[in-house]
Image: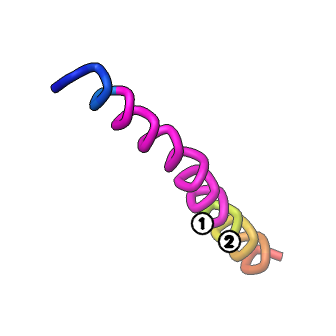
Amino acid sequence: MTRDELNREFRMHSATFPAVLTVYGALIGTLVLSAMAITA
C-alpha cells in the first residue's frame, strides 16, 4: 500500500466521521426524549 492509498483511505474515513457522529447523536437524542416522555 502506497502513501497515496493510505492518505485516500484516511480521507474517506475522516469524511464519514461527522456523519457517524450525527447518526449516533440522533439515536441518543431520540432515546433520551422518549425516556423523558415515559418518565414524565
Front-most of residues 4 and 16: 4
Say left or right for 29 vs 13: right
Label 1, secondary structure: give it. helix
Quadrant for the N terminus in the image: top left
Callout 1–callout 2 Cβ contact below 8 Å: yes
Q: Residue furthest top?
A: 3
Residue furthest to the right in view is 40
Mark 1, Cα crowd under 10 Å, few <14 / some 14-19 / many 20+, is few
Which residue bears the numbered disc 2? Answer: 30
Q: Residue furthest left?
A: 1
Residue span colored magenta = 7-26
Residue at image location 50% in from the left, 49% down from the top: 16
- Would you identify the image quadrant in which residue 24 lies? bottom right
Tell me: residue 11, above or below residue 17: above
- Colour setup of the view: rainbow
Name above or below for residue 6 compared with residue 28.
above
* Residue 13, x across and y down, in percent: 42, 41
Count of numbered labels shown in the rendering? 2
Distance between the Cα atoms at labels 1 and 2?
Answer: 5 Å
Asked whether 8 falls inside the magenta stretch, the response is yes
The residue located at (37%, 35%) in the rendering is 8
**Residue under pointer 1:** 27
- Circle 2 — which element? helix
- Amino acid type of the residue that numbered disc 2 sits on in the rendered structure: Thr
| Amino acid type assigned to the residue bearing label 1 in the image | Leu
Residue at image position (70%, 76%) is 34
Measuring from the top left, give residue 12's x and y in whole percent. Answer: 43, 43
Q: Nearer the viewer, residue 12 or 2?
A: 2
Is 29 displayed left or right of 27 in the figure? right
Tell me, yes or no, whether the highlighted magenta stretch contains residue 11.
yes
In front: 21, or 39? 21
Is 28 placed left or right of 33 in the picture? left
